[in-house]
Amino acid sequence: MFAHALQVCSHHFEIHVVPPQKSFVSIIDRRYCRQAKGRSARGLGPQSPMWDRSPFPGPGHRAHDSGMDTLASGGPPSAIDHSPRSRRGWLPGSGPMMTPSARADPMGPLDALFLHAEDGINHMHIASCAIFAGPAPSIDEMTRLIESKLPALTRYRQRVQFVLGGLGHPVWVDDPHFSLRSHVHHVTLSPPGSLRDLERLMGELMSSELDRRRPLWDAWLVQGLTRGRWALISKVHHCMVDGIAGTGLMTVLLDLDPDAPLAPIQPWLPVPAPSSVALAAGALARLAAAPVRGALALRTAGLGSRRRGDRLGDVVTGLRSLGERLAAPSPALSIEGAIGPRRRWAAARCTLADVRTIRNEFGGSVNDVVLAAISGAFRTLLVERGDAIDETVVLRSLVPVSVRHPGDATSNNQVSLIVAELPVGIADPVERLHRMCAQMTELKASHQSDAGEAVEAAGEFLPPVMLSLGTRAVVAMLHRVPQRFINTVTTNVPGPQFPLYALGREMLEYLPFVPIAEGVRIGVAIMSYNGRITFGVTGDDGTAPDVHRMAERIEAEIVNLRDRARRRQHRGGESS
């Protein structure tokens, strides 16, 4: 029977590499090549790399340009490619299942894991809130803009279809009933339309899951903000996009030029999905190719290269580092434990110039400074809640790290993980910053991200039904016995240091949202854009109603460190 299924599959399906689509981002990318010389006044000379970790259109930026120091670089989504190519190259059985009249794109193991982990309480969507200068566009104008960008976002017109019996990972198929009216919404804030009102709206919108009967994204045009401003909230499932690379709506919606014309609307016809039997047959073929696919994935992770002995040693070192960090005892804290389905959200802001002042005076990177500020905010929050905090207490934070190779513009998730310790037990802000700097230096040499990448590569060997059942079993167990290994999550996405536009209006701020899960009641996302750094603090509505206090303390920590840096500079100038 198995052999017959494979024979049927080989007769009906050919594996193709689908060429990358030309997205609007790639057009901007090429246009910027011709304009690079004239942008040196913004600190982006002609030798600056076109893309370096930034998910937005236009030139990339070195870590020293934006000040954001990440552990691994992400690649440019200059053409959001939904073909099966990835950082691992061509993997047998990883391509779309196609016939002359049907097509389905299988998810990878990590994308499928994000889908299976969602259960009504653990929402697996990522989001952003972009604030623009006025006047606000109409809902028709916004819908027209989004429609013009959809050719660069194939997944935004596809829905999830599960494979019969769980024989394969879920697949993406074109939604024959796709309508932008079901995804683009309009909200007007009640007066006065304050930022706090916008934060409350964001929390409400993030408190429900996306409808799996449709493509897994939604957007809201928000009017009525003070001073004539307006906002665009984007919400997308993590199985669709890489949260660090940012291969989503905002990456293609924004322009370098305020006078950029709208792209013409391109006609679109959905490709029919294969039948359930055909999908099952294709899944069996993928199962047969899993050993080869897994071996190639491990080879790309370095375990099959000539230096595999050294690379294997790095992975073992990383696994040991992760194990030691997660096994260390920690006190019970109020920010860990069970969560509910509802969310609260608050935003904090600071200038990149202030953070650089701190960095230049006390050392470290911009990333170290913002993590130290977050540590100080957590310390204040815990003390105010009555938690017992001594100098040994640390918070273990999950930190996603991009392992996307330069030039890879696929939409699948390509992330590894490290576990950082936020030194909340240290009372002095400068001492806390120095400890954060030392620890991040240690982490870069710990090979934790190598270990995470190897584990992800090994997931190619795991039968899809085991991944699905195993993920759901773990999530169900965590509802009964919440984990205490991870206390929070912090994710950092460097953005461009020049203005971007939508419909001719300048984007003033880009506010990020990070999901939380069982055992983690508060998470923080960080984003830099055009000389500013913004923080999005996500909290469980029932157990973390004080996320606004957390956001206020992040801002206060930055101000405190900045003032101390300036006083030290002043004393140094007097002594000289």
Image (tube, rainbow, N blue to C red):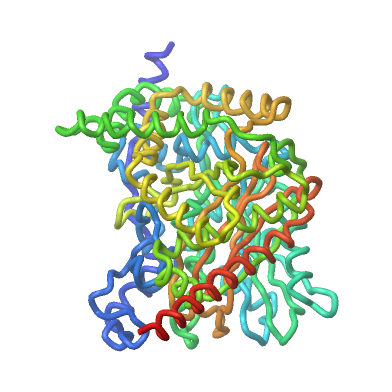
- In the picture, residue 189 is in which quadrant? bottom right
Q: Which residue is drawn at the image coordinates 72% and 40% (left, top)?
A: 121
Q: Where's residue 446, x and y in %?
A: 35, 40
Which of these two is toward me, 21 or 80?
A: 80
Is 233 displayed left or right of 164 in the figure? right
Q: Position of residue 373 (x, y in %)?
A: 57, 61
Direction left: furthest residue: 306
Tell which of 417 and 149 is nearer to you. 417
For the C terminus, the quadrant is bottom left
The quarter of the picture where residue 61 lies is bottom left
| Residue 542 x %, y % | 81, 46
- Which residue occupies the foreground of this view, 571 or 86? 571
Q: Which residue is located at x 28 percent, y 43 percent?
A: 89
Quadrant for the N terminus in the image: top left
Q: Please, is residue 342 above or below residue 286 in the view?
A: below
Residue 518: image location, x then y, percent: 67, 37
Asked whether residue 118 appears in the rendered view, the answer is: yes
